[in-house]
Amino acid sequence: MADLHVPSGTPVPGPSVRPRRLRATPALRRMVAETTFEARQLVLPLFVREGLDEPRPIDSMPGVVQHTRDSAKRAVAEAAELGLGGVMLFGIPERKDASGSGGLDPAGILNVAIADAVAEVGEDLTVMSDLCLDEFTDHGHCGVLDERGRVDNDATLAVYAEMARAQADAGVHMVGPSGMMDGQVAVIRDALDVVGHPDVSILAYSAKYSSAFYGPFREAVDSSLSGDRRTYQQDPANALEGVREALLDVEQGADIVMVKPAMAYLDVVRQVRDAVDVPVAAYNISGEYAMVEAAAAHGWIDREAAILETLTSIRRAGADIILTYWAAEAARLRR
Ligand code: PBG
């Protein structure tokens, strides 16, 4: 080992380049920050449950609840006051069936929640809805099953077309197809146009991975799923395929494409951002939320700092928009 001790009095030349200069004060750091996020770029997912008298906490997502229709309206109004980008509504029905018919029923919980939200905020906030069958099917899959129990892509597309129409009739501004069926964006775009809703836009869950980090969401929506979604959601090993899915969705008429989850897929966010010419969203999902909340509850990490760092890194990777359960809180922290 070389002796690294420098005898006192020996002149040492200083570095000629000093990146630390720009880190010296909070004011300097603020001036040179490359990435920020604003309330308008955050979308708050909300769970609305049929037949509830009061909001019900979700154990695995401390601070997040299943809303009643009334409490959901208040949350939507608050989102508008905070200047959030939007809300993404999920419905939890009392009864499920094999074809997910509760999602098509105008009196179904998601459709009434959409109407409630739009009645509350009009065009002051973008009201979005999950367009998928998994909350409404008794088997918990995102589509209908064929006689052998496999998810039937094309039969599902026909149901999605109907669901899009029901959501648009309820007044939704933007639908979020999340079922990963091939061709879903084209079919939904067509269905909306044909029934006179050419102005309803599509946020496509384009690169959606089969992820262990959805665990808490399954509790949040009382999921009936046994097994997994690997025949339709993507293999976490594949990034090129995520870009391909996003390009296909743009071709089919997606107004915004999304990568999901966010944190374990920041490389995919970046690659998709570089490949498309529409806004890119990323979904900071339930498991990402739960990990930070759980560690913070133990005192193992600084909660607020971890939230800000999480959202900043998703923006840095290239996401223009972030769906996050921290949307309201993060917007307040930014004020
Ligand atoms: C499917 C859907 C899921 C999520 C959003 N839409 C779950 C899944 O695919 O299993 C997950 C969101 C989250 O984990 O926060 N309708």
Image (tube, rainbow, N blue to C red):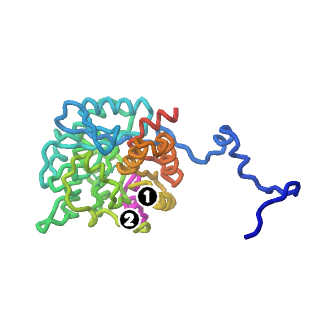
Q: Is residue 71 located in the magenta-colored stretch of the structure?
A: no
Range of magenta residues: 242-259
Q: Secondary structure at mark 2?
A: loop
Q: Going 18% across and 38% down the picture, which residue do you hit?
A: 50
Residue annotated with mark 2: 236
Q: Are marks 2 and 1 in contact (CB under 8 Å)?
A: yes
Residue 179, picture quadrant = bottom left
Q: Earlier in the sequence, mark 2 or mark 1?
A: 2
Q: Secondary structure at mark 1?
A: helix
Please tell me whether residue 326 is drawn above or below residue 256 in the rendered image.
above
Amino acid carrying mark 2 in the image: Pro
Q: How far across and down, in percent of the image, does residue 185 sit? A: 32, 57
Residue annotated with mark 1: 264
Query: Can residue 114 be seen in this snapshot?
Result: no
Q: Going 48% across and 48% down the picture, which residue do you hit?
A: 310
Could you classify mark 2 by the number of other residues whose Cα lies within 10 Å: few (under 14), some (14-19), or many (20 or more)?
A: some
Q: Going 20% across and 63% down the picture, which residue do you hit?
A: 151
Q: How far across and down, in percent of the image, does residue 187 sit? A: 27, 57
Query: Can residue 200 be seen in this snapshot?
Result: yes
Please tell me whether residue 117 is drawn above or below residue 202 in the rendered image.
above
| In front of the other: 275 or 24 | 24
115 left or right of 41 in image: left
